[in-house]
Image (tube, grey):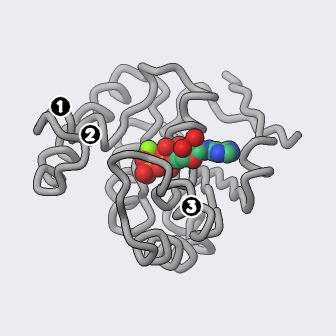
Amino acid sequence: MTKIAIPDFSLVVLIGATGSGKSSFARKHFLETEIVSSDACRAIVSDDETDLAATSDAFDLLNHTAAIRLKRRLVTVIDATSVKREDRAKLVQLARKYHALPVALVLDIDPKICHERNQNRCNRDFGEHVTRNHAKALKRGLRGLQKEGFRQVQIMKSPGEVNALEITREP
Ligand code: ATP
Ligand code: MG
């Protein structure tokens, strides 16, 4: 068991390829209302959580929702892949604006495992290159997360490490 404590007022950014287990992890550790998910936002603006044409509007909604929650000093968890630095930059900026602590929780899972999992899911009919590309992008950013402004970084390198993480909150 690995235990980490996050401050009561954090913006938690999950980082991981499709299939790495972000949504499962979020459900295990956080309230449903604390989680702002790009898929849920996509569904709200298009009735289809897989509609890629809705991505820009979906992220507008995601950022707006997160901003309102942070303005109200509520812990907020971003459930999106966030494997690209430019995607994370907006979130760090948002956390800074509202004086929340930006926390990065990385699910650095073998893309083969992610792909295998996705094959058993509906709505995730991706070629193997998708998880591979996500993993590559993730690796590129891994060492710079502190520099990007994340004050706490936890990298989980296997499903076992993901399952073993315990999160507590401190005032
Ligand atoms: P996406 O980015 O596509 O939304 P995700 O990162 O949110 O993917 P999940 O939906 O949480 O991934 O999980 C993908 C699949 O992997 C699911 O079928 C889930 O049951 C399985 N899974 C998630 N976490 C674990 C785990 N720790 N151990 C074993 N299987 C897991
Ligand atoms: Mg998900």
- Label 2 – label 1 distance at C-alpha: 10 Å
**Residue in the picture at 14% in, 34% down:** 47
Say whether marks 2 and 1 touch (CB < 8 Å).
Answer: no
User: Which one is earlier in the sequence, the residue at label 2 or at label 1?
Assistant: 1
Classify the position of the C terminus by image quarter.
Answer: top right
Of the pair 137 and 17, the residue shown nearer to us: 17
Instruction: Read off the residue under disc 1.
Output: 44
Does dot 1 land on a helix, a strand or a loop? helix
Residue 86 falls left or right of residue 28: left
Classify the position of the N terminus by image quarter.
Answer: top right
Q: Quadrant of residue 153?
A: bottom right
Horizontal and vertical percent for residue 83? Answer: 45, 65
Q: From this viewpoint, is residue 158 visible?
A: yes
Say whether marks 3 and 2 touch (CB < 8 Å).
Answer: no
Instruction: Read off the residue under disc 2.
Output: 62
- Given this view, does label 2 or label 1 mark the residue nearer the observer? 1
- Residue type at the position of mark 2: Leu
Is the CB of mark 2 within 8 Å of ligand 2? no
- Given this view, does label 3 or label 2 mark the residue nearer the observer? 3
Is the CB of mark 1 within 8 Å of ligand 2? no
**Residue in the picture at 47% in, 36% down:** 77
Horizontal and vertical percent for residue 84? Answer: 40, 68
Of the pair 93 and 133, the residue shown nearer to us: 133
Quarter of the displayed picture in which ligand 2 can be seen: top left
Does dot 2 land on a helix, a strand or a loop? helix
- Residue type at the position of mark 3: Glu
Instruction: Read off the residue under disc 3.
Output: 116
- Label 3 – label 1 distance at C-alpha: 28 Å
